[in-house]
Amino acid sequence: MRALIRASLRSRPANGHRAFLPQIRKLVFEYCDKWPTSANTRTYISNQIEALAAANPHVEVVVKQRNQKEPIARGFYVNNRDKVIPLKSLEVTGIQQKVQLLLDSSGAKIVPLKRRAVESTTEATRGIWSGLHADRPSL
């Protein structure tokens, strides 16, 4: 008889009409302590990072120093993808908008909506049409 493990009895959570699981799992802010391009990022971190972490308890918020490089915000998602947004030329309100974009995003690849090829798993019912085998129309 096979052993029954307790963890295997749990149901896996999924998005649906009763529950919503945010797709972001980690949010990392990287900035330089000395560069002037990181000034607005430092202001955002010192004033609003605690409120962000309290409002989103499901997200791990990490602040790292990245010496002599431009500031970035990086979101890590459940599907093992990440998105990086540069914060170099943004004001504090712009940084808030970009962070909200990372929080609301699913982490999925951007797929173009135009020119999507129609794919079928079955062959056409009448076969493949060819102009060489068709009957000539009578006038």
Image: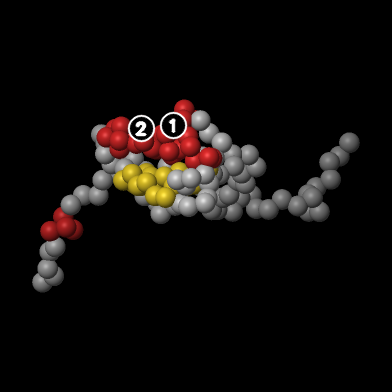
At label 1, counting other C-alpha atoms closer than 10 Å, the crowd grade (few under 14, some 14-19, many 20 or more) is some
- Which residue appears at 59% of the width and 42% of the height? 112
Quadrant location, the N terminus: bottom left
Look at 68% across and 53% down and name the residue there: 128
Numbered tag placed on residue 96 in the rendering: 1
Q: Earlier in the sequence, mark 2 or mark 1?
A: 2
Front residue of 51/44: it is 44
Q: Are marks 2 and 1 in contact (CB under 8 Å)?
A: yes
Q: Secondary structure at mark 2?
A: helix
Quarter where residue 37 is shown: top right
The secondary structure type at the circle numbered 1 is: helix
The residue labelled by disc 2 is 48
Q: Which label sits in the foreground, 2 or 1?
A: 2
Residue 98 visible within the image: no
Amino acid carrying mark 2 in the image: Gln
Identify which residue, 112 or 124, lies in the foreground.
112
Can you name the residue that lies furthest to the front here? 34
Q: Position of residue 17 (x, y in %)?
A: 29, 33
In this view, 104 is above or below 62: above
Instruction: Name which residue lies at 81% across and 53% down.
Output: 132
Hey, which residue is sitting farthest right in the picture? Answer: 139
